[in-house]
Image (cartoon, rainbow, N blue to C red):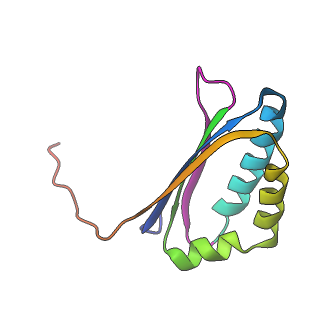
């Protein structure tokens, strides 16, 4: 990790069974593109074990400018539009701001 994040986003999607494969494809393409962008510290897409069609996206951005740049790219807009055509039963997303950093003194 080369950047220290100031924004973490945690999103959860529940997808209709017939659209799970398509959503997985869209989410993974978006994540791959985002990871290449300046300011993306990480972006992980996971599918919940034991809860078919439930995906969690966890991402961290260096700052609001980097996140805003990502959100405004044509490829993000395209996959967002594509995902919007899928059967999303429920979606929840939260953004967390990190206001500071402290090194932890941990025993070895």
Residue 69 sits in quarter: bottom right
Image coordinates of residue 95 in percent, x first then y, are 48, 60
Residue 37 sits in quarter: bottom right
* Quadrant including the C terminus: top left
Q: Residue at x 79, y 50 (%)?
A: 83
Image coordinates of residue 32 in percent, x first then y, are 71, 55
The answer to whether residue 87 is magenta is no
Position of residue 20 in the picture relative to residue 62 (left or right): right
* Outermost residue, front side: 89
Q: Residue at x 22, y 61 (%)?
A: 103
In the rendered image, the vertical position of residue 72 relative to residue 45, given as above or below = below
Position of residue 16 in the picture relative to residue 94 (left or right): right
* Outermost residue, bottom side: 65
Q: Residue at x 84, y 53 (%)?
A: 82
Position of residue 73 in the picture relative to residue 98 (left or right): right
What are the residue bounds of the magenta stretch? 38-53
Position of residue 39 in the picture relative to residue 102 (left or right): right
Image coordinates of residue 102 in percent, x first then y, are 23, 64
In the rendered image, the vertical position of residue 50 relative to residue 31, given as above or below = above
Q: Residue at x 78, y 27 (%)?
A: 17
Image coordinates of residue 48 in percent, x first then y, are 59, 30
The answer to whether residue 48 is magenta is yes
Numbered circles on residues, count: 0
């Amino acid at each position: 990790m080369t950047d220290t994040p100031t924004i973490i986003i945690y999103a959860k999607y529940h997808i209709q069974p017939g659209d799970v494969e398509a959503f997985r494809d869209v989410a993974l393409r978006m994540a791959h593109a985002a990871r290449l962008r300046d300011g993306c510290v990480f972006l992980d897409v996971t599918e919940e074990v034991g809860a078919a069609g439930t995906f969690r996206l966890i991402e961290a951005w260096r700052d609001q400018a980097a996140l805003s740049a990502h959100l405004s790219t044509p490829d993000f807009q395209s996959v967002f539009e594509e995902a919007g055509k899928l059967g999303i039963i429920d979606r929840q997303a939260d953004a967390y701001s990190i206001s500071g950093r402290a090194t932890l003194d941990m025993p070895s």
